[in-house]
Image (spheres, rainbow, N blue to C red):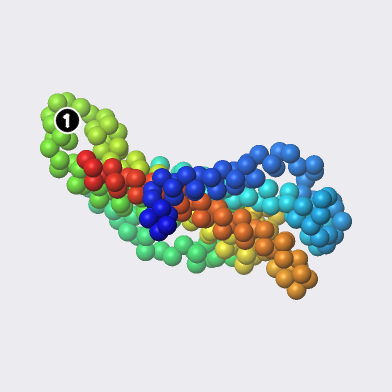
Amino acid sequence: MRSFFTHAPFRLYLGLLLLAVCIVVGGILPWLAPGDPLVWYSAPRNQNPSGAYWLGTTSLGQDVFWLLTYALRNSIILGLIVAGLSTVIGVFLGLAAGYAGGWLDRVLSFFMDALLCIPTLPILILMAALFGGQLALPIVGLLLVVFNWPYPARQVRAVALTMREREFINVAWFSGESSTRILIRHIFPYIAGWSAANFINTVLVGISTESALAVIGLSSAQQATLGTMIYWAINYQALLGGKYVWIGSPVVAIVLLFIGLFLVSSGLSMQSAAKRMSV
């Protein structure tokens, strides 16, 4: 049984199944909502789960199920944007620094090391204080991109430094191939699998960081995310009032989303490692 769970395809497919469920709930179902679940008192308050309200309603008169679909959609979009920009910027700058070397490598390495040494959450808390106590989602996403691109850049740079000394890279260079073609055709395929795994890990970072900010009241409470759902549930004493589904549904959604992303990331990493060992 243990070897079955450590099998790369099993991890990958199980993770993809969990992600597919999250994407359906957060990507498709919001378009089918009977109304805007963000509007207060659009439903009876404090209703228990029933046929009319599958997960009950909040103390603010919101349908928990449809609110969860909106929150999951916004959290996934934020994570994907942060991960996409961070991975693209990091891979591009890491390849450029590692392959070019010289002054470009020194300048980019300085910025990588500087940003890696700065703790992200305290900076976000400071920025929230400067912006009046709450950060809008676009600002949160921008700051997360700034602090997350050095992670893939640093590791891609290390790969590029070793790859540029390989014999086939020298052959390609002496054959007249451009640096851009060498990077894309000969070096990038070696890091493509890892880049995909890093992209997924950065999705985790983006969602978890925004959720942490929202729970302590420093993210925009006017936009539905998994973190803001927990924030409002805590503010209105959902646990003391016995509204466990209200506060529990976003927590379960975060856990399932994180498990799915972790399984996909580890499955891709294991397959990439196996491919490199077979070469």
Name the residue nearer the viewer: 64 or 181.
64
Would you identify the image quadrant in which residue 193 lies?
Answer: top left
Residue that extends furthest to the right in the rendered view of this protein: 44
**Left or right: residue 146 compared with residue 247:** left
Give the amino acid at mark 1: Ala
Name the residue nearer the viewer: 195 or 273.
273
Total numbered badges shown on the rendered structure: 1
At x 26%, y 38%, the residue is: 187
**Residue 210 in view, yes or no:** no
- The spot of residue 123 in percent (x, y) is 49, 64
At x 34%, y 49%, the residue is: 270
Does 230 appear above or below 203? below
The residue singled out by tag 1 in the image is: 172
At x 23%, y 42%, the residue is: 278
- The spot of residue 195 in percent (x, y) is 37, 45
**Left or right: residue 26 compared with residue 19:** right
**Left or right: residue 4 compared with residue 157:** right
**Residue 113 in view, yes or no:** yes
Give the crowd class for mark 1: few <14, some 14-19, many >=20 residues within 10 Å: some
At x 59%, y 51%, the residue is: 75
> Which quarter of the figure is the C terminus placed in?
top left
Name the residue nearer the viewer: 34 or 128.
34
